[in-house]
Image: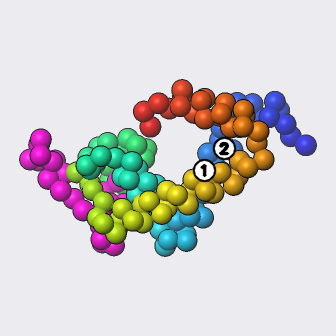
């Protein structure tokens, strides 16, 4: 049996990222969303009054053209809308519609539940250590 020591830190993180991705796949499927659409909605639900396209690209680690296509697809489903940025007339912010917010909250809760299920057998101190390490590694993501 492979142990954590055998895997190494980076490989363990890659495996963990696959688990998180699996949660987005499973939850997205239950709401007829791709994993990327579910991630986009969750990111927007955590935002304040809308997020610019450049910031979305950074948050989702996507190129500008990929973000545009992703936003186009969820906008066609009336889950988001593009609104003028009050500080810059040339820029647009992406905001959730009422239906988008409902779906974003449901998807976020579903992902959280799925991840909690995956970690259910871990002792509390290990869960806390993982959470602390994640915050230190990615404080602004």
Of the 4 image quadrants, the one containing the C terminus is top left
Q: Which mark is residue 16?
A: 2
State the CA–CA distance, disc 2 to disc 1: 6 Å
Rendered image quadrant of residue 80: bottom left
Describe the element under mark 1 as helix, strand or loop.
helix
Above or below residue 80? Residue 18 is: above
Horizontal side, residue 88 vs residue 56: left or right: left
| Residue 81 is a magenta residue | yes
Instruction: Indicate left or right for 1 with 12 as reference.
Output: right
Q: Residue at x 63, y 57 (%)?
A: 114
- Which quadrant: the N terminus? top right
Q: Decide whether residue 49 is among the magenta residues.
A: no
Camera sees residue 34: no
Element at label 2:
helix
- The location of residue 44, given as percent across then percent down, is 36, 52
Q: Nearer the viewer, residue 130 or 137?
A: 130
Taking the image as shown, residue 25 lies to the left or right of residue 36, namely right
Counting other residues with Cα less than 10 Å from the Cα at mark 1, is it few (<14), some (14-19), or many (20 or more)? some
Q: Position of residue 91 (x, y in %)?
A: 16, 47
Residue of label 1: 20
Is the residue marked by circle 2 packed among few (<14), some (14-19), or many (20+) residues within 10 Å? Answer: few
Residue at the extreme left of the image, as rendered: 89
Residue depicted at 55% across the width and 71% down the height:
30
Pinpoint residue 103: horizontal percent, then vertical percent: 42, 66
Magenta span: 67-92
Q: Residue furthest right?
A: 1
Find residue 12 and report its image quarter: top right
Residue 41's place in the image compared with 55, above or below, is below
The image shows a total of numbered marks equal to 2
Query: Looking at the image, do the residues carrying marks 2 and 1 touch, with CB atoms under 8 Å apart?
Result: yes
Q: Residue at x 60, y 64 (%)?
A: 26
Specify whether residue 71 is in view: yes
């Amino acid at each position: 049996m492979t142990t954590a020591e055998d895997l190494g830190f980076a490989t363990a993180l890659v495996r963990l990222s696959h688990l998180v991705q699996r949660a987005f796949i499973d939850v997205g499927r239950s709401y007829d969303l791709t994993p990327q659409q579910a991630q986009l909605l969750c990111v927007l639900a955590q935002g304040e009054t809308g997020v610019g396209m450049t910031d979305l690209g950074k948050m989702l680690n996507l190129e500008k053209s990929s973000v545009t296509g992703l936003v186009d697809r969820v906008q066609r489903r009336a889950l988001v809308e593009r609104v003028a940025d009050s500080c810059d007339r040339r820029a647009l912010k992406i905001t959730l519609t009422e239906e988008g917010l409902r779906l974003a909250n449901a998807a976020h809760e579903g992902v959280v539940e799925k991840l909690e299920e995956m970690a259910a057998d871990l002792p509390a101190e290990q869960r806390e250590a993982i959470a602390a390490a994640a915050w230190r590694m990615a404080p602004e993501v």
